[in-house]
Image (spheres, rainbow, N blue to C red):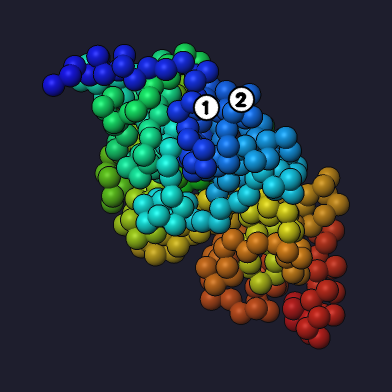
């Protein structure tokens, strides 16, 4: 049997040769989040003219993507199922130019689409940690759909990064499973903790009032999720079962708030499919069994989520209407991002014994000139979470508990947590369309 170290050397190629090993007309997958194989994708962007009709599928990238140049048409095409955060305009221009598109899917379903051949993967491009003494790398800070992509692909390319941490869970990849290896030594993308204003802080406090000691939480990254996690500093024995494990969760673990001691699934262990945040988080998670990553079709499966009693899901959105419909993917008809795992965790939390699903949203946008609670969603908006599945909506003005509420009761509750400057307008609009006062 060939020694794995010998195999490793045989598979090594320079990153400049990436176009030589990806055949024309290939469908490729890229690792996502902070595991984004940017050394490879930067080379692809630079050498786009050497590719013929090659598409790239990915969850949220870890850094800025440059695959939206109209000159790339016919060469490369970017098809994420969660759009690049902070690049909405570039992404939309790419869609118009025919070099980008969007793959509608819940995060929990993406592996099944690949495995069943509905979205075939020819080339899987992974970001990996260095191999151990037995020749096993790990998928590092993201293992979401990578295993399924590997098993479906004809070609597997591993970007092995000396700075990628080794993460426990279902993350191991042996050198023998790779066709090509590209070595890099570069820092992972980081997301610093965003500053939190008074409105976000108030939203966090309202959410904390809904979360009991011993709960298992799911939250994302950004101002609103960070504000909620900050507000949990006095809680006891929280656990994590989340699509994403973040720096704020690490802080709560270090403070003894997150212990996972009361979890009814994976007791004593915090579970996610992606880990993303600061360098301190990556260093803390390295070789740390307290946080483990598993494939997204497991982590985000509502039936699995529901095995955690008192599961609290915390998700943000773009807009909410007075019936409880939640838009989290588009600004009107303009695709901005994807459904991600929002609906997966909304359903899982609803099914969980004692669970709660919370949608957080600032009451206004555009400097206070636009209400984010409206009578109807903006024309063309994609409904992410249907009204039938919405439980709690929280703004800086309060909590609207929509469980068991009629349409009129929902409108009344949501007008009550809208910005005061817009409550009269919302009431008048409702009366104009439906002929009665929702506050009666």
Q: Residue at x 53, y 76 (%)?
A: 404
- Residue under label 1: 19
Instruction: Out of 307 and 125, give the one closest to the viewer.
Output: 125
Left or right of residue 95: residue 309: left
Q: Which mark is residue 47?
A: 2
Q: Residue at x 49, y 56 (%)?
A: 106
Q: In the rendered view, would you say 317 is above or below 47?
A: below
Snapshot quadrant of residue 386: bottom right
Snapshot quadrant of residue 153: top left
Instruction: Out of 50 and 324, give the one closest to the viewer.
Output: 50
Q: In the rendered view, would you say 374 is above or below 142?
A: below
Q: Point out the image quarter for the N terminus.
A: top left
Q: Earlier in the sequence, mark 1 or mark 2?
A: 1
Give the class, few, some or many, for how many residues have Cα within 10 Å of label 2's Cα (few <14, many ≥20).
some
Secondary element type, mark 2: loop
Secondary element type, mark 1: helix
Residue extending furthest toward the left: 1
Left or right of residue 75: residue 282: left
Residue 129 seen in this snapshot:
yes
Instruction: Out of 158 and 120, give the one closest to the viewer.
Output: 120
Residue 197 seen in this snapshot:
no
Q: Residue at x 85, y 74 (%)?
A: 428
Q: In the rendered view, would you say 337 is above or below 437?
A: above
Is the residue under label 2 in contact with that under label 1 (CB below 8 Å)?
A: yes
Q: Residue at x 79, y 57 (%)?
A: 371
Instruction: Out of 436 and 283, give the one closest to the viewer.
Output: 283
């Amino acid at each position: 049997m060939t020694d794995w170290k010998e195999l490793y050397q045989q598979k090594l190629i320079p990153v400049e040769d990436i176009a030589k090993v990806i055949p024309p007309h290939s469908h490729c997958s890229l690792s996502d989040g902070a595991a984004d194989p940017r050394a490879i994708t930067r080379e692809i962007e630079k050498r786009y003219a050497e590719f013929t009709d090659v598409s790239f599928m990915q969850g949220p990238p870890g850094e800025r993507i440059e695959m939206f140049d109209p000159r790339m048409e016919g060469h490369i095409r970017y098809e994420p199922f969660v759009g690049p955060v902070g690049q909405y305009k570039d992404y939309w221009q790419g869609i118009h130019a025919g070099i980008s598109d969007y793959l509608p899917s819940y995060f929990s379903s993406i592996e099944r689409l690949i495995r069943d051949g509905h979205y075939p993967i020819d080339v899987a491009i992974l970001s990996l940690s260095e191999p151990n003494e037995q020749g096993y790398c790990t998928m590092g800070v993201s293992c979401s759909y990578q295993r399924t992509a590997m098993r479906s692909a004809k070609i597997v390319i591993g970007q092995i990064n000396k700075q990628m941490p080794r993460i426990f869970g279902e993350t191991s990849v042996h050198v023998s499973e790779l066709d090509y290896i590209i070595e890099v030594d570069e820092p992972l993308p980081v997301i610093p903790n965003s500053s939190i204003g008074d409105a976000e802080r108030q939203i966090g406090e309202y959410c904390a009032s809904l979360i009991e000691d011993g709960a298992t939480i799911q939250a994302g990254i950004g101002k609103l999720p960070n504000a909620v996690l900050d507000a949990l500093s006095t809680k006891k024995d929280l656990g994590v079962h989340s699509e994403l494990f973040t720096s704020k969760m690490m802080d709560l673990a270090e403070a003894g708030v997150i212990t996972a001691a009361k979890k009814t699934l994976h007791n004593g262990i915090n579970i996610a499919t992606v880990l993303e945040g600061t360098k301190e988080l990556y260093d803390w998670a390295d070789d740390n069994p307290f946080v483990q990553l598993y494939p997204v079709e497991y982590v985000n499966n509502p039936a699995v989520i529901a095995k955690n009693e008192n599961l609290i899901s915390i998700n943000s959105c773009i807009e909410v209407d007075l019936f409880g419909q939640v838009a989290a993917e588009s600004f009107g008809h303009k695709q901005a991002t994807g459904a991600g795992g929002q609906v997966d965790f909304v359903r899982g939390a609803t099914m969980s014994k004692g669970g709660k699903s919370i949608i957080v949203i600032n009451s206004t946008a555009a400097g206070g000139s636009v209400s984010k609670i409206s009578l109807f969603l903006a024309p063309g908006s994609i409904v992410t979470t249907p009204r039938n599945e919405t439980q709690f909506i929280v703004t800086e003005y309060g909590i609207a508990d929509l469980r068991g509420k009629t349409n009129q009761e929902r409108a009344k509750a949501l007008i009550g947590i809208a910005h005061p400057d817009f409550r009269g307008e919302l009431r008048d609009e409702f009366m104009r369309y439906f002929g009665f006062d929702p506050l009666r």
